[in-house]
Amino acid sequence: MPGSVEALVNVLESYRGRDKLVRTLCYGSQLVGGVISQKARGQSSLGKSLLLFSAQLSHCRTVLRLFDDLSMFAYSRSIGLGAAEEDPGLRWMSVLNNLADQLYYPCEHIAWAADAKIIRAKSDKWWTLSTALWGISLLLGILRSLRILLLLRRKLKKNERSRQRESSEPGVQAGLELRQIRSEVLSVASSMADLANAIHWMPPGFLWAGRFPDWLVGLLGTTSSLIGLHQMCTGGGGGGV
């Protein structure tokens, strides 16, 4: 128990860890609140309270993202044009993904400032633009992970043939590649859950925009958040707005 408490404290002391825990709590509250409200046909005060709590946590994360621009810029600058990627497809998907992420933040900041009456502007179009950029980033992330899985599969087959010729056992490298495959599969599942929600938050008329009940949004977000927490704890990355 003391070890678990200490691990939780360590997570909460880091911005990234705290954000992931708040995100999980936000979507988890929406999931439970949505289920309770649906069963009570909207008459449950507990369900309404949980949904309001979820909305406040979401707003909290939006405000905290006001300070993410510089770190995102530094990250994009370190990636550059993706010279570290040997595969051209991965290189350009990484560059476009970072570009979408970089543009997302100022668009969201403008939308937030318009809602807060700090600037005189209509927030709807800025929220739509930021959501679209998030969706594009998620889609590029999915395509990138699928490309990595394809390359890893080819590499594993090649190594397997080499081992069969040499009659050797799988080495450490094979284990690392299998762990990377599992990590990329989880990333695809997480991004697909978030992409479904991103489309839901687009203007009505676009695919299934506006059609998800609260509990389904919460379920998808909770699934993505738990995957992100798992990847963070195991060093496999993971993210999400």
Image (spheres, rainbow, N blue to C red):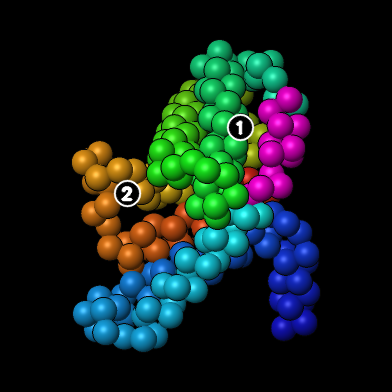
177 vs 126, left or right, is: right
**Circle 1 SS class:** helix
The residue nearer to you, when weighing 155 against 9, is: 9
- Give the numbered dot on residue 166: none
Q: Position of residue 92 (x, y in %)?
A: 55, 17
Q: Position of residue 30 (x, y in %)?
A: 41, 69
Q: Which residues are magenta?
A: 65-77
The reply to whether the magenta stretch includes residue 67 is yes
Count of numbered labels shown in the rendering: 2
Give the residue type that dot 1 points to: Gln
The reply to whether the magenta stretch includes residue 130 is no
Q: Which residue is mark 2?
A: 200
The residue nearer to you, when weighing 219 against 230, is: 219
Q: CA distance from mark 2 to mark 1?
A: 22 Å
Q: Which residue is mark 1?
A: 102
Give the residue type that dot 2 points to: His
The structure residue drawn at horizontal position 55% and vertical position 66%, both measured from the top left corner, is 57
Q: Dividing the image into 4 quarters, which one contains the N terminus?
A: bottom right
Can residue 53 be seen at all in this image of the molecule?
Answer: yes
